[in-house]
Amino acid sequence: MKKFVTIKDIAKKAGVSINTVSRALNNKPDINPETKKKVLEIAKELGYIRDLSALSLKNGVTRTIGVVFEDSSNPFYAEVFKGVEHQARKYGYQVILMNTERDYIREIQAVETLIEKRVDGIIISPTQFDKKDIEHLINLNYPFVVLGVHFENSQFDEIYSDDLKGGYLATRHLLERGKQKILMINAYMYKSVAKMRYLGYKRALEESGLQPYFMVEIEEGYESCFNKILELKNMSYDAVFCFNDVFAIAALKALKALNKRVPQDVAVVGYDDISYASFVNPSLTTVRIDKYKEGMIAFDLLHERLTEKRTEPAQIVLDVELIERESS
């Protein structure tokens, strides 16, 4: 079995006290620069690895945060995670990512696991969590930030996009293209994001003197949307507004299978502006969220809590914009 190098080993080789080694490794100011340099070089030479778990037990800080996402393979969350990780690295934090696959039990288990691992705080994008579950974290006095979802009258940190505006922009764009029978393929509306995007869709139609044409709620995922479009093959519509770009890309594929021309027969608009949106054929008109920025701000909100720079809850609403491409 490999024997781990201790600060005692470093002290012996450097010819200094254990206390001096400790000060050098912990970047304390009260140490001669030459001595510090010598200690660090010997530590590196011997292959010294700091025992972070022991350090965290001593000071109660692990410099680790947890991130809980519903589907880390979704390009949307991949980009958000990059933003979180960028800021975390900047401030010397490690990040543990937990994937829940949109399952309530897995969400509960993910949060419990992160707390057991003594992460300093959690960023969570909840799928099945309700306000009671979130408030449980408050009762535990555990620092956290909710990402991508808004709870009414919340008293905790949130960052989310202006989904009402996004739904409105997408639908108004289709109306300006002369479309009137606009089908909306939505996620289940227990999610605030789905509800707000629908309300934006509804507002744009009502402003034009129209009632919502048809809205269907489905499980999230490419196959779910692809199959739903095929299922509705006998329905008459001239546009589809999709809950996200994954849905929209599936819709493009299904419409092609039904010999529908996009955008001549049916226009398609997505949401999120994931990286694939500009590469599909036809390229996808979509509502852009600055995902990287959302991740960065989520970490900053959490870091403000961890460093006690802020005690009042913050709600950050990110603006959105319509990106016009070939599908509409």
Image (cartoon, rainbow, N blue to C red):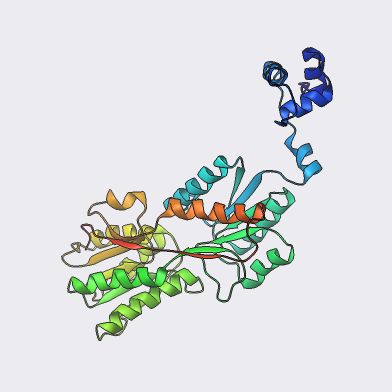
Q: In which quarter of the image is residue 43?
A: top right
- In front of the other: 267 or 228: 267
Classify residue 291 by image quadrant.
bottom left
Taking the spot 17% from the left edge, 74% from the top edge, the residue there is: 178
The quarter in which the N terminus is drawn is top right
Q: Which residue is more in the foreground, 96 or 230?
A: 96
The C terminus sits in image quarter? bottom left
Q: Residue 99, percent across and down?
A: 57, 52
Residue beneath the point at 20% across and 57% down: 326
How many badges with numbers are in the image? Answer: 0
- Indicate the position of residue 108 as horizontal and vertical percent values: 66, 61
Which is nearer the eye, 180 or 172?
172
Q: Where is residue 27 in the image (x, y as percent from the top left)?
A: 70, 31
From where the camera sits, is residue 275 visible?
yes
The location of residue 262, given as percent across then percent down, is: 20, 62
Q: Is residue 251 visible?
A: no
Q: In this view, does 86 lie above or below 108?
A: above
